Image (cartoon, helix red, strand yellow):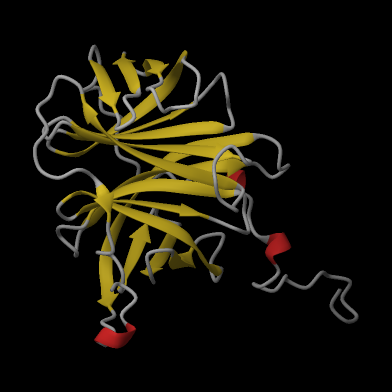
Amino acid sequence: MTANTGEYAAPTLSDTSTWLPLDGLAPGFDANKAPHSSDLTGRTVTLVDERGTRIAHTFAESRVEWSYQPGATDPLPASAGADDYEAFLVDTGLYFVQFHHESNPVEAVTVVLDLTAGRALSVVQAIGDLLPGTTAVRQLFVPSRIEGIETTGVEPARTRALIGRRVMWVYSPVHAYEHIYLSPQWYTWQCLAGPEKGLADTDENSVWEIRPGIYLFAWREKVIPCASVTIADHRNVRSIRSHGALFGLDETGTVPTHFTFGAYGRLISTTVHPDPYDPAV
């Protein structure tokens, strides 16, 4: 307590025990979320990966029925289910789809569907040790092709294109952050406005190029048990648009929490390292 006042002093920013839990961030954080797209309604989209694993998704207005048939080298058993989903239109023929498994709430799924190029990227997020990694929430990335659509262009692949950029993201009239993309493994975030103002950390990240200038950016936090998958169109660096989802545990550390959001961004600066020290090389 502060001397002679009987009032508690404000916690220091480095006291991670006072950081906001994932469910505490949610109220109002989704103000800039794009509307749900119903473009996939009535359509079945089947993904086939390099193992021969087939995942069929049949979309209604807000529900998706899925069935998983493992390939010859896939150790997972066959399964099926249905979940609520949200879909966001990123670009012509390109959709960002999110759903949280009702039958297994420690898993959430992102599917990026390029119905023009016939390609997809799935990201499975899992709480605990179901996937390789060291963070509380871990991520698995699986590129695939869309059955029945001729594939064109290049397959989604990891990229270093964002390294050196510093981007500001505005999630609502209250929430704003900046990201500094440091290396293929690390990025730094800082809260510029909102309940986490002044907090910052460096966490694991993964970046995949979906189309030229459009990137899937995923991160895994080490302090708060959560992770996120986003997609952002960086083609106009003065007017970047992103869509995303956060997944992790609530304040009790026991209840899985999943919510979607959106942000408007702009490039603040770019760092260019001399060749011998460039982390992008």
Q: Is residue 232 left or right of residue 104?
A: left
Residue at 26%, 88% in the rendered image: 274
Residue 66's x, y, as percent?
39, 16
Residue 99 is at least partly visible in this image = yes
Quadrant containing the C terminus is bottom left
Q: Is residue 215 left or right of residue 130?
A: left
Residue 142 vs 45, above or below: the answer is below
Residue at 65%, 60% in the rendered image: 19
Residue at 12%, 24% in the rendered image: 149
State the residue in front, 196 or 60: 60
Residue at 19%, 64% in the rendered image: 237
State the residue in front, 113 or 10: 113
Q: Is residue 27 left or right of residue 94?
A: right
Residue 20 vs 179, above or below: the answer is above
Residue 131's x, y, as percent?
54, 41
Residue 280's x, y, as percent?
30, 72
Quadrant containing the N terminus is bottom right
